[in-house]
Every structure is written in C-alpha cells, then in structure tokens.
Image (tube, helix red, strand yellow):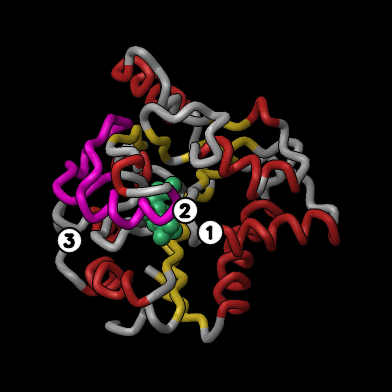
C-alpha cells in the first residue's frame, strides 16, 4: 500500500489526480469505479479542468458507481446519480450510456443487486476510487460486513446517518438504507485509490494502514490489495 500525505488542499487534489489520469492516459477505454461524497469533489474538478485544458477524452470510458441511497429518485439532488452528473459527468465528454449505477428505487432489491454483481463480474474495473467513512466503511460496507460480500442492501449505521445528515434538512430526512457494491467486488479492481481528509477520518486511516485486518474496519481489507494508493491530508494522516 502506498500512502501519500498532502501538505495542503491543492496537493491533496493533485496527488489523487496524478493517480487517476495515469490510468486514463494509458487506457482511453478504461473502466472507472467512482465514488460520491465531499472528498472526491476536488479530484472531479481537476478532471474537468484537465478535460477542458488538455482535451483528455472520456468518450470510450465506462464507469460504475459504488452505491446509491434506497428511496431517492435520480431527480433528487442528493441521489448519487444527480451528484455524479452535477460534479463530474456534465463537465466531461463521457457518454451517459456508459455510466452504471445501482438503482435505489428498484422494487426488487435483490434482483437489482444481482444485476449489478453480474455486470461487475463481466467488467474489470481499472481504477476504483474510494472515500472512507469515519467508522472505516468503504462504499456503504459498514463495520461487520463480510469480506466476501457482493452488491447488497445495507441498513446504514447511526454514525453514517449522522455524518450524511449534513447534506439533508435533518437526521429524520436522511436515508437510512443504501445499495452498495460489496467488498469482494471492490477488491477485484486493478488499482484502488482511496482519498481521505479531515480529523474525523484519522482513526479510520490509522486502522486501514496500520491496524489489524478485521471486518470491524471494512477498509482494512485493502491491506491485501496488490495496488492500493491512499491519499490523505495531514489531519487524516495525523495518527500514522
Ligand atoms: C460514497 C461512498 C462513501 C463515502 C464516505 C465518505 O459513494 O461510498 O463510502 O466515500 O462515506 O464520505 P465523505 O467523502 O462525504 O466524507
């Protein structure tokens, strides 16, 4: 596992961008695994900037997003489809038909997760971008999730609902369930890029890099990944 500690916000975005663009330049038809949340926004800004300045094209790129809330329509500005359109896709030339999401409005959730798992088994992700929860979750694989898990429905933990409530009117209106890619599927990516910033991520980053590998800290499974890069700011890396 390679850990890169950024001295400031600019370097944080730059380090992550270097890892991402390296894959895209070497493979213009790469498959990207994408994440939402506040952490990767600075990376997406850089990808848009680069697309505009250097004409990097995404026309042959495909993507798979990690997760989606249950019960939010894609027109809801907190849905992850909306987030990706708003923060990345509208600024680059990706074909929306090449972007894949779990459908949080699906009537038959098990069937929807099986559909996504089948697609993931047929498509090898070249770079999987991840954030990390303050409780060590990756995607929405909460502590206690089996390392063998595939796409599934999750009851979000109290701490995750509280963390996510900053994007909603109140805790009461924050979704309590999500569909997520499983840990075994994340591990199949050729390269993993995990980004984390802020003090509230310091314990999770310590556990990921130096702790014991345990299902109680889902991100620790990445200790077994052959090509994992962790980009942190000084606060998130303060316990290393
Ligand atoms: C989002 C996701 C989550 C977030 C994590 C951190 O697609 O998979 O695991 O990466 O909750 O969120 P932020 O970046 O908002 O701190």
Q: Left or right of 18: which side holds 213? A: left
Label 1, secondary structure: give it: loop
Relative to 230, residue 141 above or below: above
Asked if marks 3 and 2 touch (Cβ < 8 Å), the reply is no
Q: Quadrant of residue 214?
A: bottom left
Instruction: Choose between 54 and 25: the one closer to the eye.
Output: 54
Q: Which residue is mark 2?
A: 37
Numbered circle sitting on residue 40: 1
Structural distance between the alpha carbons of marks 2 and 1: 7 Å
Q: Residue at x 36, y 46 (%)?
A: 139
- At a point 49% along the width and 62% down the height, the residue shown is 39
Find the magenta span and give its range: 141-168
Asked if disc 1 is less than 8 Å from ligand 1, the answer is yes
Identify the residue position indicated by label 3 in the image. Answer: 213
Q: Earlier in the sequence, mark 3 or mark 1?
A: 1
| Residue 131 at least partly seen | no
Q: Is residue 105 left or right of residue 90?
A: left
| Element at label 3 | loop
Q: Nearer the viewer, mark 3 or mark 2?
A: 2
- Residue at 64% over, 60% down: 22
Q: Position of residue 222 (x, y in %)?
A: 31, 57
Quadrant of the frame with the N terminus: bottom left
Disc 3 or 2, which lies upstream in sequence?
2
Residue 177 in which image quadrant = top left
**CA distance separating discs 3 and 1:** 25 Å
Count of marks, rendered view: 3
Whether residues under marks 2 and 1 lie with C-beta atoms below 8 angstroms apart, the answer is yes
Residue 133 point in image, percent of width and height: 32, 58
């Amino acid at each position: 596992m390679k850990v890169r500690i950024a001295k400031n916000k600019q370097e944080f975005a730059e380090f992550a961008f270097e890892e991402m663009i390296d894959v895209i330049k070497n493979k213009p038809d790469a498959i990207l695994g994408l994440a939402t949340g506040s952490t990767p926004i600075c990376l997406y800004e850089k990808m848009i900037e680069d697309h505009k300045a250097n004409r990097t094209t995404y026309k042959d790129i495909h993507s798979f997003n990690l997760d989606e809330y249950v019960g939010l329509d894609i027109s809801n500005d907190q849905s992850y489809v909306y987030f990706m359109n708003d923060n990345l896709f509208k600024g680059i030339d990706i074909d929306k038909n090449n972007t894949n999401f779990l459908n949080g409005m699906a009537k038959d959730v098990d069937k929807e997760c099986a559909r996504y798992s089948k697609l993931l088994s047929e498509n090898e992700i070249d770079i999987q971008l991840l954030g990390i929860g303050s409780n060590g979750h990756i995607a929405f694989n909460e502590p206690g999730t089996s390392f063998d898990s595939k796409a599934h429905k999750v009851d979000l933990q109290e701490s995750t609902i509280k963390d996510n409530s900053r994007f909603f009117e109140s805790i009461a209106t924050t979704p309590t369930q999500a569909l997520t890619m499983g840990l075994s599927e994340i591990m199949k990516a050729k390269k993993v890029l995990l980004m984390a910033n802020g003090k509230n991520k310091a314990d999770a980053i310590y556990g990921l890099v130096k702790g014991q590998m345990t299902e109680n800290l889902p991100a620790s499974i990445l200790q077994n990944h052959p090509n994992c890069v962790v980009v942190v700011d000084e606060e998130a890396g303060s316990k290393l």
